[in-house]
Image: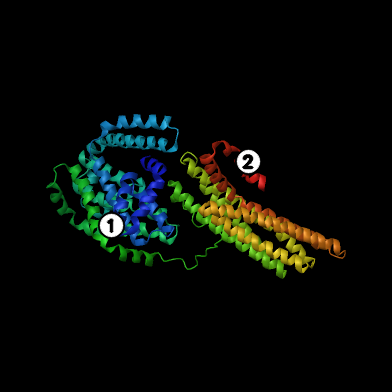
Amino acid sequence: MVNTGVTRAFGRELGRVLNYSLQNRVKSFLGGLGVTMLLQSSTATALLTASFAGRGLVTASAGIAVMLGADVGTTLVAQALSFDLSWLAPALLFVGFVRHSTAKSTRAKNLGRIFLGLGMMLTALKLLVLASGPIRDSEVAQFVFSSLADEPVMTVILGALIAFVAHSSLATVLFIITLVSTGGIPFVVALAMILGANLGGALPPVLATLHADPAARRPPLGNFICRLIGVIAVLPFLGLVGPELAKLTADQGRQIVNFHTFFNLGLAAFFIFFTGPLGKLTEKIIPEKLNNDANAPRPMHLDKAALESPQLAMANAVRDTLRMGDILEKMFRDLQVAFQTNNNEQLNIVRDADEVTNEFNAGIKSYLTELGREMLDEEDEKRCTDIMTFTTNMEHVGNIVVLNMVDLVEKSSKNQMSFSKEDMDDHNELFQMAVANLKLSFSVFLTREHAQAASLIQQKQKLRDTEHKAVNAHLARLRRDGQMDEGSSAMHLGLLSDLRRINSLIAAVAYPIVQAHESSRIRHDNPVGAEKNKEKLDPASNA
């Protein structure tokens, strides 16, 4: 709950902090440390880093440095929670409940979620102490744990399994501290389980990014390699560690949490100088896909792991929406080639591309729907709706191309219809204008700049004027030439009408941007005129 609350309330700011810290290995390390202390989960930081890496914003070496910082950050959280803070739990639970129940804004509600989560964590730690009593008093449990003292490798594997199942090395470490503090397990077994917890805690990010882009998979893999090397290096010397830890404190619980911290600090101090070679190693282990076709017939960036952060999830959806635009542009060009050359095989390629755009639209909608509305603030919810509206419009564009225009072109080829040079010139001009507007619409969708949005609206009007002139010119030629084929005339006018309809769908993305800009300006200059201006900018009235 703490992780979810922080991500939902401050995910955008955390993303900016993490992105800013990626300038060098030291800043990357500190950024990973700070973000993890807030999220209280190195796994969450790993997934954030993987999402940045998948977008090309993080190199493998910088991502590994972030992960080293995340590992140290989670040990500092363990240090704080290893103290008896259970007296804070009732206050945190009360404040969190009141805040979450009465808050009006999403951010305030998630602040309550954070307090509730902290209160539950402290309560759970107290309950762990009580629940470990039967383990301490059980002869069977004592026999099993005593037997593990002579099986360090098996103990490491057990600790790794517990951390993997819990999806949290922090929870596992706190559980081990509780057991050793109450005499539930021998000290040397606890040390080996701590090593296992560090190893097992690195596995969830590796598995969560298993189907992601190669770049997104490398930082978690690099972190797992660091921990694996560290465990192998330290395991033979566990017998020497205990006396050294005892020099700092006699409390075995504190000795365990200190060992956890020192282990991760040692890994960071050593591997921070080798992030470059480690990054190259992960690139060799996970090379770029040779057949990574940008127009692969399926969404590629809808990473489920990124759904914990609405900003990252929407960034992933935008990436696949832009790929959807590339497919639509190719559909237009293939249709134009088929029209000019009477190539029906080219029309089958257009139909296949339409099925791909339908799959993209369905995939993006399903992905964004999984975010839910409760976790989005007003700005994110609006952006989420804008993305789904835009992809729906693009799917409608593809439907018009396939259900109307492809059918008309196929009929013209089958019936061997001929078009005048003037009609062909009009077709080509409007095709080119529609393609140019399609490309501009995706730029507007991505940047949301007012100037580009206004330009798209102007280009929409220009295409409408051009289409109007082409229709009038064609009707004039039809009146002059009584021998003109009526079938080809109707088909020509149908194609022009379809291009105009497509153009309206393409330009729809610009109206909310221009409306928001104009409304903001008018509210600033003349609040009374804002409502009147809103009607003028309604896209429905301009369709």
In the rendering, which numbered label is found on residue 26?
1
Residue 440 showing in the rendered view: yes
The answer to which of 434 and 223 lies nearer the viewer is 434
Q: Is residue 308 left or right of residue 199?
A: right
- Residue at 28% x, 49% y: name it: 73
Query: Does residue 80 lie above or below 226 as drawn?
Result: above
Image coordinates for residue 347, horizontal then vertical, percent: 68, 64
- Residue at 42% x, 42% y: name it: 8
Secondary structure, mark 1, is helix
Query: Does residue 66 lie above or below 115 as drawn?
Result: below
Query: Does residue 485 lie above or below 142 as drawn?
Result: below
Name, please, the residue furthest toward the front.
525
Query: Hey, what amino acid is under mark 1?
Result: Val
Res 97 → quadrant: top left
The answer to which of 53 and 536 lies nearer the viewer is 536
Depth-wise, is mark 1 or mark 2 nearer the camera?
2
Image coordinates for residue 467, horizontal then vertical, percent: 72, 58
Image coordinates for residue 427, horizontal then vertical, percent: 71, 63
**Total number of numbered discs in the rendering:** 2
Q: CA–CA distance between discs 1 and 2?
A: 54 Å
In the rendering, which numbered label is found on residue 7?
none
Residue 151 showing in the rendered view: no
Secondary structure, mark 2, is helix
Mark sitting earlier along the chain (1/2): 1
The residue carrying pointer 1 sits among few (fewer than 14), some (14 to 19) or many (20 or more) residues within 10 Å by Cα, namely: some
The answer to which of 221 and 382 lies nearer the viewer is 382
Query: Does residue 207 lie above or below 108 as drawn?
Result: below
Please give the residue where the numbered disc 2 appears in the rendered image.
535
Q: Is residue 448 left or right of residue 271?
A: right
